[in-house]
Image (tube, rainbow, N blue to C red):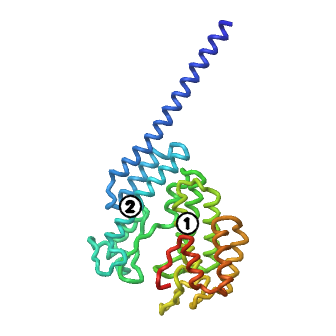
Amino acid sequence: MWWSMIMNKRILILLVFILTGFGCSLSQNSDAIKKYNQYLSGLSSSDYKNVSLAMDYYVKNISILSPGECDLGYVKFREFYDKVDSVFSVVLGTGDPNFTPRQKIYIRAVDPKYENENDVIAFHKSLGENGFYISAGSEPGYYVGEPEGFMVDKFGKYVSPVISEYLKLREVNLKNPAYYDIYIWITPEEMADRLKNWDKYLSDYPNSLVFEKAKFEMSRYLNDFLCIFLPFQDSNPNGETNLMTFDMSGTMTPTGKMLYEKLISECGDSYLGNLLRNYYDVLKKTGYQRNSQAIEFLKSRGFEVYKEN
């Protein structure tokens, strides 16, 4: 009896020790995320090289935590990265032909005649290491982009499968951009596939930490697929256009009908499936014309349709 009592007491003490230690570990991990957030807040977003510092801190202090905490750490990192991206775009005078960059290296970096100069090569290398590239736009101005593979390479091995899947879906557009300036560079079929994949992600992972960001990625395609803006085609020598599922007059194309019916069938009762099903029903009644009735439907679903449409 006495031996049993001693053993039970020892087991109880051991359990308390384990649970207490485990609790401290969780608390420390939570503190680690708070400290990371504080660290990021102390980094200047006006220096793109601080992105490397933010990544180094993540690898050293966050990547060793639980998958959920690694996910949260990635979200915090991405918030900082986006701030740097936003400031960098202003510094470069993105889209502003009257803005002169503060540093001549920005001008030299997008001029082909300087591409083999040592300072230009070093600058591009430094940009790439911090998750950026710059290029000259089709109009005067500079454009900041995220290199393909950057986020997957840096964070894919640390985050959970939920965030990893999100990063992989984003890679599709980084490897084959859907847009260049105001032009669409992918086919209607490719856009339909991307919509379906994002819709599946939203259906599979409603509690994802990047759920809202995934919705944003999907919305970029939806605007053109639903014809929020009337199609146009300009005199660009490459013939770029934003034609997708409707023609120049606002009439749905045979390809558009086929893709709508395909997605309605494949997406079932998902957000995209229901949206397209209801919109398609409206279009059938209008003779597949994008008229005031179709526009009112889009507005009722929260889409912003400009007056000129």
Q: Nearer the viewer, residue 101 or 302?
A: 302
Image height of 208 relative to 245, above or below: above
- Which amino acid is tagged 2? Lys
123 displayed left or right of 145: left
Mark 2 sits on what residue?
83
301 displayed left or right of 1: left
- In this rendering, the count of numbered labels is 2
Query: Mark 2, mark 1: which one is toward the viewer?
Result: 2
Q: Which numbered tag is attached to residue 47?
A: none
Image height of 30 relative to 166, above or below: above
Residue ID at (51%, 46%)? 69
- Which amino acid is tagged 1? Glu
| SS category of the residue bearing label 2 | helix
Q: Say whether residue 176 is visible.
A: no
Mark 1 sits on what residue?
171
Q: CA distance from mark 2 to mark 1?
A: 20 Å
Query: Could you say where residue 52 lies in the image, as x and y percent from the top left?
Result: 40, 56
Q: Nearer the viewer, residue 9 or 265?
A: 265
| SS category of the residue bearing label 1 | helix
